Amino acid sequence: MYAMGVMFVPPVILFLLGVLVNRHTGVLMEEWVRPLGKRTKNPAVVKFLLSSVMQRALLAPMVWILMTLLDGKCFICAFSMNVDPKYFTGIPNSTGLELVKIMAKVPCKEDVIFKNSSFRKAVSRYVRCYSQAIGWSILLFFIFLGAVGRVIKPCFNHATFLQTRYWSNYLDIEQKLFDETCVLHARDFARKCVVQFFENMREDVTVRMPLSSALRPSTIRNEYEEEEEERLHGITRQDQVDHLLQTWYECKPELDVTKMAYKPKVCITWEDHNGKALFSDV
């Protein structure tokens, strides 16, 4: 049981870790559970992402199993009791239950029973040959399977494959860009909140000093504020941020970049002391 555990438990753990750390797993789940919104779901893209996740997650477990089989030690420990000892010479004079215990001690090199005896080496070599044969057979099977896949791949609709791969890559890149944009927005949003806090704590100070006409503080300040507002994309309140993230989850943008995005305009209205609008400017 210990040998079988060493052979198969770590691959299961490696497989689960491979699924968890794979970025495509998050993209796959988000695409699978997201509301329909303005963008339809493509089952082929979901299957392609699932296939990509499974292939990458199975790589480490298969390497572990193949290396274990080619090494043969775990296989000897697990199946030495199943070998018929009558095919080997130099077996200790024992029968029945004692013979089973002797076969179970074959992996133990330093056991006194096998001192000055070639029996243990012969049994170990025999079981190791089976283990390596199974390992090489599995490896050759996967090589053959990959070669067949490469050969018959052009026989299918290659355009469909290219489309599926393109949109699966698009989903991954789109999520990366959204995350990066959110990080930049959060940094600017936090910086502006901190600056406003410090400015609210500051007392009014008037400083008089000569300044060249070529350097206009108001112009510099306006250009900096415009750049800052552009990085914030007009999202300047907590409720706006929450609404933006909720909308991104519930209604992904339509895949059509020919449509111009709506840009809200700022309308300034001048009123008199009675609240009556005198004129407006956009």
Image (tube, rainbow, N blue to C red):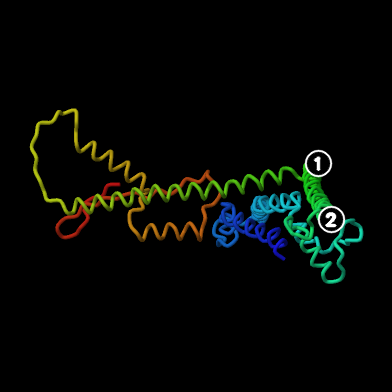
Instruction: Answer few, some or many: residues within 10 Å of disc 1's Cα (few below 14, many 20 plus, some between 14 and 19).
Output: few
Q: Which is more foreground, mark 2 or mark 1?
A: 2
Earlier in the chain: of badge 2 and badge 1, it is 2
> Marks 2 and 1: CB-CB under 8 Å?
no
For the residue pair 30 and 83, the one nearer the viewer reads as 83
- Give how far across and how far down residue 110 sits, in percent: 72, 56
Q: Please indicate whether residue 49 sits to the left or right of residue 174 in the image.
A: right
Above or below residue 76? Residue 97 is below
The answer to which image quadrant residue 272 occupies is bottom left
**Mark 2 vs mark 1, CA separation in Å:** 48 Å
Instruction: Return the residue found at the far right.
Output: 87
* Image location (x, y in percent) of residue 245: 44, 58
| Location of mark 1 (residue) | 151
Q: Is residue 185 left or right of residue 10?
A: left
Residue visible at 51% across and 58% down?
251
Image point 69% across, 49% down: which residue? 63
Residue at image x 46%, y 59%? 247
Image coordinates for residue 256, horizontal then vertical, percent: 55, 47
Q: Nearer the viewer, residue 59 or 146?
A: 59
Does dot 2 land on a helix, a strand or a loop?
A: helix
Q: Is residue 249 left or right of residue 126?
A: left
**Furthest-bottom residue in this view:** 97
| Disc 2 target residue | 119
Kind of element beneath mark 1: helix
Q: Position of residue 152 (x, y in %)?
A: 81, 44
The amino acid sitting under disc 2 is Phe
Please tell me which residue lies in front, 22 or 95: 95
Q: Work out whether 260 lies above or below 47.
A: above
Mark 2, Cα crowd under 10 Å, few <14 / some 14-19 / many 20+, is: some
Quadrant of the frame with the N terminus: bottom right
